[in-house]
Amino acid sequence: MKKSKNKRAAGKRGGLLRRAISAAAIAAGALALIYLAGSFFFAGHYFWRTEIDGTDVSFRSRERVREECLNPEIYYELVITGRDEMEDVLTPAELGMSYVFDDTLDRFSAQMSGWAWPKMFFSSSTCELPRVVTYEDDALEKRLRESPFFDPDHIRKPRDAKISEYEAGSGYSIIPEDSGTVLDFEKVKEAAGKALKELEEELDLREGGFYSDADVKSDDPRLKRALETANRYAGAEITYRWNGEEEVIDGSLISTWITIDGDEVHLDEEAVREHVNGLAKKHDTFGREREFTASDGTLHRLKGSYGWWTNRVGETQELLSSIENGERLEKEPLYFSRGYAEGPAGEDIGNSYVEIDLGGQHLYLYIDGKKILESDLVSGNVARGYATPAGVYGLTYKERNATLTGETYATPVKYWMPFNGNIGMHDASWRKEFGGEIYRTNGSHGCINLPEEIAETIYGYVEQGFPVVCYD
């Protein structure tokens, strides 16, 4: 029984050995077949991890790679790109392009024996092929001139960045430059030739200074300063109350006075002056003839040194300064003289005034349309040429206890109210009578002589600029 067990164990060991030997033989045969197949394949193909001129040729046909390397028409082209998404492709056939090689590729391939293919798992192979690229210069020039880059219909000259026209609500802005599409032909030809010789596949004309460019760009500091100045000027808003009427000067008007020349901004001072003059002419009433309805209902047409009179020179300078500083304000213009009321000639007298009827030698004082008083008076001596002139005037000032002087007199008065040069209203305590025909031969030197109590009352109501209307 024991002997039988030993025989079975020995038999089992022998079977395992035979199977191991059989498996090893099969594996060795398989490896041999793989090796032979690899040797056969790599006899005509490049090893794994093989590069030629930077191109991975792993597992590729040696003959195919050789053909591509020796004949540029098979795989090479030069893509040229430029502005406005323009593109062109140059091919070797158009340029009579060819390569001149030495035997580097053949020697490199010969060193890569198919029987040695397993070593590719342990090392890589690279090869740089020395070559000379040739092309026809005339063909390149002709081809480039026919390209879209030099087509007159595609050429656009550069345009500088500039400041836009004024737009209400947004003011001025910078219109960006247009770099255009004007190329330097000789520079492009040189770069294309270099790219062909080095077998570069792309040439980007947008880089490298091939194009002409705008001289002034959007980010030009001087242009930005000019924009800031123009918008400051146009951003000004001056709202005038000009003799009772509103006059607005804002960007829509100011922009017509602004001239922009590149990065220079000019404000037309003469145009500003003319506009101020126009407004002054529209609203001024000083010295203009006006109608006046007297207390007795008669209508008189009168002139005189009264009314609104704009200081045109001064206001022009004020307005220029406000515009240059970009100010936004409400104001009155500068005046040499003001009416006591707002409105056109006639209305500027208002309903508070002194009315002097020279022919009737009578005076009235109205305050807010209500007659406060009336009185007889004595005006300038007609016989001696001192007749008081008719007209509308504004009270120059008033003074208590003044002394009126002339060549032959020095007369003290308690209430002095001049309105036309040295002509004014005042008390005349030396007179016992007023009115009638006294003024014709015994009148004043032109002043309006009044009873003291009347002069005192008037003095209490009037002030500088108060209207005084004299008529015959």
Image: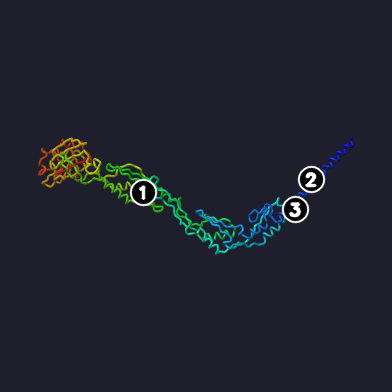
Three-letter amino acid code of the residue under disc 2 = Ala
Task: Out of 336 and 242, give the one closest to the viewer.
Answer: 242
Residue 466 screen position, x and y as percent:
22, 40
Q: Mark 3 sits on what residue?
A: 36
The CA distance from mark 1 to mark 3 is 90 Å
Residue 382 numbered mark, or none: none
Give, as a three-letter code, the residue at label 3. Answer: Leu
Nearer to the camera, 153 or 204: 153
Give the mark toward the camera: 1 or 3.
3
Q: Nearer the viewer, residue 451 or 259?
A: 259
Label 2 – label 1 distance at C-alpha: 100 Å
Residue for badge 1:
255
**Dot 3 crowding, Cα within 10 Å, few <14, some 14–19, many 20+:** some
Which quarter of the figure is the C terminus placed in?
top left
The 10 Å Cα crowd at callout 2, few under 14, some 14 to 19, many 20 or more, is few
Does residue 218 sit above or below 293 in this rendering?
below
Q: Which quadrant would residue 355 be assigned to in this image?
A: top left
x, y (%) of residue 150?
50, 59
Q: Quadrant of residue 447?
A: top left
Position of the N terminus by quadrant: top right
Q: Secondary structure at mark 3?
A: helix
Q: Which residue is mark 2?
A: 23
CA–CA distance in space, label 3 to label 2: 20 Å
User: Where residue 42 sits: x, y (%)?
Assistant: 71, 54
Work out whether mark 3 precedes mark 2 in sequence or the reverse, and give the earlier one: 2
**Above or below — where is 92 with respect to 237?**
below
Residue 129 vs 368, above or below: the answer is: below
Amino acid type, label 1: Ser
Q: Earlier in the sequence, mark 2 or mark 1?
A: 2
The percent position of residue 208, horizontal first and vertical second, equals 53, 56
